[in-house]
Image (tube, rainbow, N blue to C red):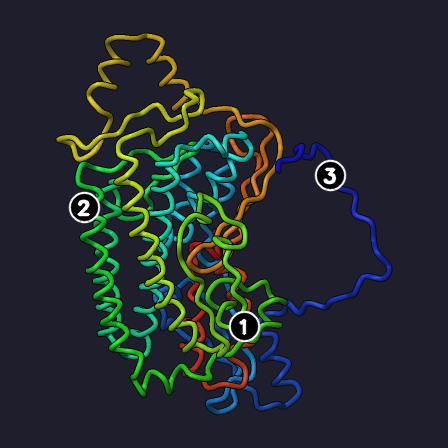
């Protein structure tokens, strides 16, 4: 439910009974200098990069005694994309192009949560065509599979198992073929728009979805055979990077990490959106709360996502052709995309109409594309279940054509806080496992 946007700063009142917390923000060079002054034998090292997400954008600082990690800190902010600030200078529809680039491994998750928030402010949540909602669910689950396969594959590669990575990426490639056929792009798709999606299925879209499902399932089966009974992998992951339920709750950890503690919290079940309550799927959980259980959970979630994808194919086949954008022409993006000789573009009929038949249609097209639509003043919070956990957005509108503020709650940002707890007391080699089991993407962390 939206509320009126604030026009004056909030007045903060001090609570004398509130607990006090001390935050130590000194740099590690200061820590080393202090250790030298006290004559302590402390070794502080910068670790990495050993993960595709940490090449120059995540600094992992370790204090070690021999091979044992006594303290861990994660230094972020090196990617500095400034996406949220940039969105304040673009129309609401153009904002999709920005937020899709945050967690670029799960790009359409950000598109969906952002558009659902806009639709709440506009009051058109119930006006979204069913076909568009099914296509959104399809894209969410294909994105979830792709994100999990990247986590599994890169995690295996960091431990020296290149075959796990190549098998995972081949499976992910099958999802990309379908995503590209429907949206026109492999990633950073700009497909989900306020009011619906940019275009429907190609002629053989349902057939492509059905043909993809057994191929991805075969690769998942292959990954199970590679990993499930592998004693080396189990030795590296079991009992490593442990994080219990109370720690998850204290740090705001969500996603597979939280579900590995036994709590079946998934917003698709807890607070359904896009009709998820009408789909048949399970939320896998574990009580082992370690890196191994998170790996297994991500595998199980991929199988559950395939079940949802199959149900989406059935529904799209039953629905047939139909609208994929809200009927209100003051909001609906005017372009009518179609695959043509140029690969993708406006349909010839639409171009003929706005350029040669109707001056009013041309004016409407021009103003809606260049200026955008007004969103009523107010603020809203919307959350969905992303592949890595709870993905939220807080949108504030001042009644204009651009967001007054857009702030995202990226699950990787919160989950990365757990790195210190996971690593301290373990071996240096276990830090690699801990980072892989968190599965963050620094584009989302440094948004």
Task: Compare marks 3 and 2 and give the one earlier in the sequence.
Answer: 3
Label 3 – label 1 distance at C-alpha: 34 Å
In the picture, residue 430 is in which quadrant?
bottom left
The residue sitting at 24% across, 40% down in the picture is 184
Task: Compare marks 3 and 1 and give the one earlier in the sequence.
Answer: 3
2 or 1: mark nearer the eye: 2
373, 135: nearer the viewer: 135
The residue sitting at 54% across, 45% down in the picture is 382
Q: Which numbered dot is residue 9?
A: 3
Contact between labelled residues 1 and 2, with CB atoms less than 8 Å apart: no
Q: Position of residue 67 (x, y in %)?
A: 46, 89
Label 2 – label 1 distance at C-alpha: 49 Å
Contact between labelled residues 2 and 3, with CB atoms less than 8 Å apart: no
Q: Position of residue 344 (x, y in %)?
A: 21, 33
Label 3 – label 2 distance at C-alpha: 55 Å
Determine which residue is flagged by label 1.
73
Determine which residue is flagged by label 2.
207
């Amino acid at each position: 439910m939206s509320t009126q946007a604030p026009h004056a700063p909030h007045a903060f009142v001090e609570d004398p009974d509130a607990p006090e917390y001390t935050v130590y923000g000194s740099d590690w060079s200061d820590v080393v200098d202090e250790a030298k002054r006290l004559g302590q034998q402390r070794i502080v090292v910068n670790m990495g990069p050993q993960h595709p997400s940490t090449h120059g954008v995540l600094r992992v600082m370790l204090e070690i005694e021999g091979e044992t990690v006594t303290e861990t800190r994660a230094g972020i902010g090196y990617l500095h994309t400034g996406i949220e600030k940039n969105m304040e200078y673009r129309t609401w529809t153009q904002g999709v192009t920005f937020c899709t680039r945050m967690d670029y491994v799960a790009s359409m998750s950000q598109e969906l949560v952002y558009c659902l928030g806009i639709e709440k402010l506009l009051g058109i949540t119930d006006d979204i065509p069913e076909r568009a909602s099914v296509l959104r669910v399809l894209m969410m689950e294909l994105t979830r599979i792709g994100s999990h396969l990247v986590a599994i594959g890169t995690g295996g590669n960091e431990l020296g198992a290149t075959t796990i990575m190549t098998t995972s990426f081949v499976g992910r490639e099958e999802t990309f073929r379908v995503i590209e056929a429907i949206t026109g792009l492999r990633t950073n798709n700009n497909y989900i728009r306020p009011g619906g999606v940019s275009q429907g299925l190609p002629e053989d879209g349902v057939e492509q979805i059905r043909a993809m499902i057994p191929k991805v399932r075969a690769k998942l089966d292959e990954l199970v055979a590679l990993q499930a009974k592998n004693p080396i992998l189990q030795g590296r992951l079991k009992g490593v990077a442990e994080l219990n339920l109370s720690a998850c709750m204290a740090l705001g950890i969500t996603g597979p990490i939280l579900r590995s503690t036994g709590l079946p919290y998934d917003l698709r079940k807890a607070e359904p959106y896009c009709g998820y309550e009408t789909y048949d799927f399970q939320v896998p959980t574990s009580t082992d709360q370690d890196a191994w259980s998170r790996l297994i959970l991500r595998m199980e979630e991929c199988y559950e996502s395939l079940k949802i994808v199959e149900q989406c194919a059935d529904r799209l086949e039953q629905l047939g052709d139909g609208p994929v954008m809200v009927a209100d022409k003051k909001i609906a993006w005017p372009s009518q995309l179609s695959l043509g000789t140029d690969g993708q573009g406006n349909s010839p009929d639409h171009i003929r109409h706005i350029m040669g038949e109707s001056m009013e249609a041309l004016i409407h097209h021009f103003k809606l594309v260049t200026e955008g639509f007004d969103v009523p003043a107010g603020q809203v919070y919307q959350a969905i279940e992303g592949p890595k956990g709870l993905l939220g957005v807080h949108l504030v509108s001042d009644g204009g054509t651009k967001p007054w503020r857009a702030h995202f709650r990226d699950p990787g940002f919160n989950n990365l806080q757990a790195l210190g707890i996971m690593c301290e007391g373990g071996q240096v080699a276990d830090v690699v496992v801990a980072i892989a089991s968190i599965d963050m993407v620094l584009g989302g962390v440094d948004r």
